[in-house]
Image (cartoon, rainbow, N blue to C red):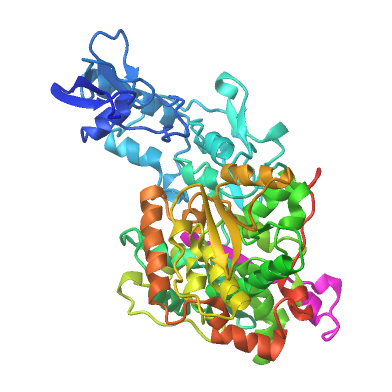
Amino acid sequence: MPEEKIPLKINDAVYECDAGMTILEACAKAAIDIPTLCYLKDINQEAACSICLVEVKGAKTLLRACVTPIRKDMEILTNTPRVRKARKLNLELLLAGHPKDCLVCDRNQSCELRKLAFDLGVRDVRFPKTTKIELPLDTTSVSLTRDPNKCILCGRCVSVCSAIQSVKAIDFSGRGKFSKITTFFDSGLANSVCVNCGQCLLVCPTGAITEKNATGEVWAALSDPKKFVVVEVAPAVRAAIGEEFGMPAGSLVTAKLAQSLRKLGFDKVFDTQFSADLTIMEEGYELIDRIKNKGSLPLITSCSPGWIKFAEHFYPEILEHISSCKSPQQMFGAIAKTYYARKYNLDPRNMMVVSIMPCTAKKFEALRPEMKSAFSYWRDELNLKESEAFYDVDFVLTTREASRLIKEAGINFINLPGEDFDEPLGISTGAAVIFGATGGVMEAALRTAYEVLTGRQLEKLDFFGLRGLEGIKVAEVDIDGLKLKVAVASSLSKARVLLDEVKEGKSPYAFIEIMTCPGGCLGGAGQPIPTNNEIKLKRMEAIYCEDKNKPIRKSHENPAVQTLYREFLGQPLGEKSHHLLHTYYKQKEGEF
């Protein structure tokens, strides 16, 4: 049934718009931009900032376009002197309470408040500073920093944490001039149920929430001649980092990225996709083992650290269903400081592993106390003390932080011809590439599980039903007569739907993939800003393009991974794999 059309006037031109639209949506359809700050479609429509004001004939006051529905024969004016004056006034009032440190703010190139001030012609703030009390920074988290002094109380972060992630780690507190966004009892993010996903950061229009900056520590490591510093790069980074250098969204810059990191001074430039293939070997065999031996099903993926912390807080009853496999980031660190160190006669104590991730939760994951497998491996042989313990991964940089290093070094990223990753930990398959997109881990695992279970070649490698940005995707896979139902969820609110079924013993699925962020790692909080669905789809297209063009597209056919098992690990799920590549989870009660 066609949508009902409503006639109305916008700036004296006649339009027909769908019933139920807001003024903001109707104006967008008419190619008229209405400025907004607090608005996020379908997520945050609180009309808190009063920037989207418009004039409607017959109305006594200016109306907020983001929440006002259109009506028949409405006459809307978006560019009158009254409208422009009111928008600028409201913006000046926001700026009066905002710090004036734009030149040194992490968000100075992507701050919506700064851009809006320029676009609306605000060149002077006529009001005295309205905030006299300097609020303390929340630096408790290892992933995120909150600066409440830069918060404009738009409510975006609160809505995303609640509606998209269903975590509710932050909320409004206080009234009037004492209003702020904070955690329960002002205890700090690290002492809350925050899962470090950073989706709040991604939607914040200012610098009120930023990632914990590790660029200084990485520069120090690169400058230390005693350190052997290697870097690993996540799949989603290569489809996004080009945006930081002015390239179109979805530009695939794998070779440029590898060369730029080599120019930065890393001793070896490796690829997390190598350990993504390794993850599929371990996780794929774990799935097969659970199917054959009637283990706990469904098996749920474990490579997204925000989701793991979410499960430990909110779903401790289903922890046995989660794969014991570490994430590719952590598998890489463990292998680099054991297998690679031994193979090339390196002292693991002098090795440093830096990972470049699209994710802020990876910073938290790297510092989990159980992520010291390489230390445990070497402890007796090198007679190491507990005081000498080291993590498998030393530092985690977001995509944005990595771009800052490249810019600071004066590397002309766009004009680099490009180079390959170093071997052997830089060799990967197409299955590893698609880890960056929601549904990719599932698809990669099925490519391997099918061939291991049947002993036959999989004719069609592309599982198109598992692709796209839908929050929940389901499919049924026929493996030699064994019909497996599988499901994919991206965002924690969507994950709850599947997890509630598991908790109640009603899940029809054998295998579930969960990614913390909407769209998967392509939409991670460490990615370039802005990140929206249109941009995610372009990044996704780049990821699947690289998969299609890879000479090898199945993880179990990666020759470097085969050599790793032959020379070092022995077999998937073997004793050495268990100690280095697998981990455990526990319920978090009063401990965050």
Residue 211 coordinates in the image, percent (x, y): 55, 52
Q: Nearer the viewer, residue 271 or 187?
A: 271
Most distant residue in the left direction:
13
When the figure is inspected, residue 498 is found, relative to residue 578, above or below; the finding is above
Q: Is residue 38 magenta?
A: no
Answer with left or right where residue 63 lies relative to residue 307: left
Residue 426 coordinates in the image, percent (x, y): 52, 81
Q: Is residue 387 magenta?
A: yes
Q: Is residue 347 visible?
A: no
When the figure is inspected, residue 387 is found, relative to residue 9, above or below; the finding is below
Q: Nearer the viewer, residue 353 or 95?
A: 353
When the figure is inspected, residue 73 is found, relative to residue 289, above or below; the finding is above
Answer with left or right where residue 460 lies relative to residue 393: left
Answer with left or right where residue 512 lies relative to residue 439: right
Residue 41 coordinates in the image, percent (x, y): 41, 35
Position of the N terminus, as image quadrant, is top left
Q: Nearer the viewer, residue 86 or 517?
A: 517
Residue depicted at 50% across the width and 72% down the height: 431
**In terms of image quadrants, where is residue 224?**
bottom right
Q: Nearer the viewer, residue 112 or 59?
A: 59
Q: Is residue 34 visible?
A: yes
Q: Total of numbered circles in the picture? A: 0
Answer with left or right where residue 129 lies relative to residue 15: right
Residue depicted at 44% across the width and 34% down the height: 42
Which portion, as a residue range, is magenta? Answer: 375-402
Residue 141 coordinates in the image, percent (x, y): 66, 49
Residue depicted at 61% across the width and 39% down the height: 166
